[in-house]
Image (spheres, rainbow, N blue to C red):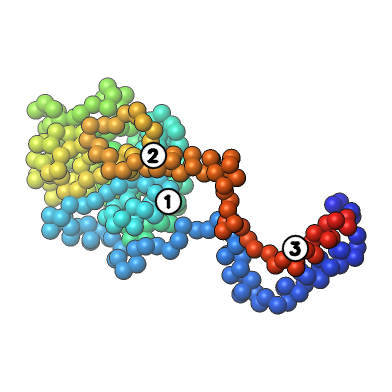
Amino acid sequence: MAQRLIPSSILKSINTSRNCFTSIVPPVASSQCQIRWSSHSPLGNPTTAGRKKVTINTLRSLYQKQEPITMITAHDFSSAHVADAAGMDIVLVGDSLAMVALGMEDTSEVVLDEMILHCRSVSRATKAAFTVGDLPMGSYEIAPEQALESAIRIIKEGRVQGVKLEGGVEMASHIEHISRAGILVIGHVGLTPQRQNSLGGFRVQGKSTASALGVLQDALAVQEAGAFAVVLEAVPAEVASSITKKLRIPTIGIGAGNGCSGQVLVQVDMSGNFPPGRFLPKFVKQYGNVWGENLRAIEEYRDEVKSRAYPAVEHTYPMAQEEFGEFEKLVESL
């Protein structure tokens, strides 16, 4: 409808200019031009060039050499991109994304389809790191067959290399069922967040002799079921160290001291990507202040937009003066 208000002579002039541009610029150059002037672009090429892909053999070799295994969580492409670039051995798509990425109250809310979506996003960035996806609550507990079906979906659709699930003795048959299908499994014992209600909250496990023996039995059951590693969460350091020495598979500690075979932290926690005043577990060391830097940058952007300092000349696209002059004449003639 707007075109009818423009005289046909002017429309002819515009169309002639477009045709000339199309005939001058070859298809390849046109495609390059489109990428160059796009309002957004991919995050860039992987920065892990030259770094070999971490495989199960790599992880076993690290364990045999007693070299600590590094693991961190990621919930999307950008968080996985930086974790991979930083040289992490394992990137875990943890169900903690329920809170840190989806704003949920706890991990029990997230469902399998949501985990698969986040696994797919993370796996596009992890060109070197070994990538593992969490099985969320409700996707594996009913029966070993359900656990295997969910694990297959995480691997096939999420494009990760392994799965993690919570539970010890009671989940051994489920782990065995998944492992026999050729899928790599990481167990998770001690404090199991998906079962926080039955544990009376997020409480340290293994503080009594009986409780410590229970954690050991769970870890041994997970090992014998075929898991290639096990997470020990919120367990006294001495207990975790003893369990690590007793097992033939790596232990990955989170709040379990430095006697484990490796460590894992939630990336949002350790990088400081949260507002002041948020509760942090005792075991978390904050290595950065991502929230503070993001807040500073966005506030500065807001102020510069309000004052018209942004965008400056260097942030605009040029136009030949004669072309603009012709454009102004055409506008004035409407």
Relative placement, left or right, of 196 versus 19 is left
Mark in front: 1 vs 3:
3
The residue identified by callout 3 is 324
Residue 246: image location, x then y, percent? 9, 44
Going from N to C along the chain, the mark reached first, 1 or 2, is 1
The residue identified by callout 1 is 78
* Badge 1 element: helix
The residue identified by callout 2 is 292
Q: Report how far apart the C-alphas of labels 1 and 3 lie in the structure.
A: 40 Å
Q: Report how far apart the C-alphas of labels 2 and 3 lie in the structure.
A: 43 Å
Q: Residues within 10 Å of mark 1 (few under 14, many from 20)?
A: some
* Badge 2 element: helix
Relative placement, left or right, of 121 versus 34 is left
> Toward which corner of the image does residue 316 lie, by quadrant?
bottom right
* Badge 3 element: helix
User: Can you see residue 325?
Assistant: yes
**The one of 274 and 84 positioned closer to us in this rendering:** 274
- Residue type at tag 1: Ser
Q: Residue furthest top?
A: 200
- Residue type at tag 2: Gly
Q: Residue at the spot x=16%, y=48% of the render? A: 261
